[in-house]
Amino acid sequence: MNAGIIGTGHYVPEKVLTNQDLEKIVDTSDEWIRTRTGIEERRIASDDMDTSDMAFHAAENALEDAGVKAEELDMIVVATVTPDQPFPSVSNMLQHRLGAKKAASMDVGAACAGFMYGLITAKQFIENGAYKNILVVGVEKLSKITNWEDRNTCVLFGDAAGAAIVAPVSDGKGILSFELGSDGSGGPHLYQDKEDDFLYMNGREVFKFAVRQMPESSVNVIKKIGLNEQDVDYLIPHQANIRIMEAARQRLGVPEEKMATSVKRYGNTSSASIPLALSEDVKAGKIKENDLVVLVGFGGGLTWGAVALKW
Ligand code: ACO
């Protein structure tokens, strides 16, 4: 028996902010943003929609998809770096709002790799037999820590939520291998400032790290289960920058149409990016039963994580 994903869900705010809109706010151009990042537009949550609200909508969507009731949840894990407030945690708020009466709840923080950390945490509780149904959510309202005068960062990020229900699965399906890692010496390259609360990034350093780490971790999780690059049916890399994603895709030799590319429409939504892309692509029929899927993410910390799973 493995832990596997038995349902997915997502939520994106209605308001679309295009590259053309950003041209009016900072000294940038649609051409610069598209060629450097692949991003065309992103979603921005309204003032009255906080992180827990987006998480709630994605969670309801995932529960429905899995056919699981909130009362059946044993645990809720929320990955976010933009909680409504430091405590109570977003997962505590979700527990109450969903009516998940018996669920334990906690938030995990690993920046854009947060969903991977949450997913692997859930896997442990399922595979040791302690729990049956775990809700894992990746959610961010990055717009509230974005400096809208800093063109180095404000063109990159967006708001969204993605969710998955993790439960025991059979027939060799589910999470087959994983890798998690961190390197705190990279902290100064990507962080939230204590004084002004804004996100700061040394884009070139993060880029250098990510183009090395994403392909390496993707290959590692495949090798761990004795398979090769050509066995991968679908790749969901963290949706940060199309050039970084391409590095992973080309290393695995996966065809273009077999890689999630929602970065175009949503920008980098940090913890939400992988579960959002997964939910959309499953519902679009791009991921089929028994497909070998690789999820791989990296983020501030620096942190990273990957899984190979059979859908
Ligand atoms: N519009 C126009 N010019 C810009 C913009 C902009 N929005 N932003 C920066 N520039 C300028 C810079 O000022 C710099 O100018 P200079 O050379 O005169 O100093 C120049 O563009 C930099 O250009 P490039 O070197 O060509 O940019 P690069 O190819 O490094 O791309 C980018 C920049 C997109 C930020 C890239 O480095 C990157 O994607 N890095 C990784 C970012 C990332 O993935 N972050 C998410 C991490 S996950 C998490 O935990 C949040």
Image (cartoon, grey):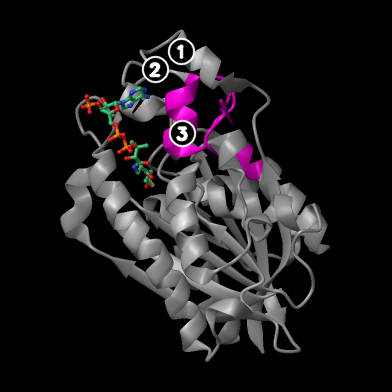
Q: Mark 3 points at which residue?
A: 35
- Eye-nearest disc, 3 or 1: 3
Comes first in the chain, label 3 or label 1: 1
Outermost top residue: 24
Q: Name the residue under label 1.
A: 23
Q: What residue type is disc 2 on?
A: Thr
Badges 2 and 1: C-beta atoms under 8 Å apart? yes
| Residue positioned 70% across, 88% down in the render | 172
Q: Which quadrant of the figure has residue 227?
A: bottom right
In front of the other: 101 or 80: 80
Judge: label 2 CB < 8 Å from ligand 1.
yes
Task: Determine whether the residue tagged by mark 1 lies in a helix, strand or loop.
Answer: helix
Is residue 203 left or right of 180 when viewed as pictured? left
Query: Looking at the picture, how far across and down is residue 306, in whole percent?
Result: 47, 69
Q: Mark 2 points at which residue?
A: 28
In front of the other: 73 or 8: 8
Q: Which quarter shows the C terminus? A: bottom right
Span colored in magenta: 30-56
- Eye-nearest disc, 2 or 3: 3
Distance from disc 3 to disc 1, alpha carbons, whole Å, reads: 15 Å
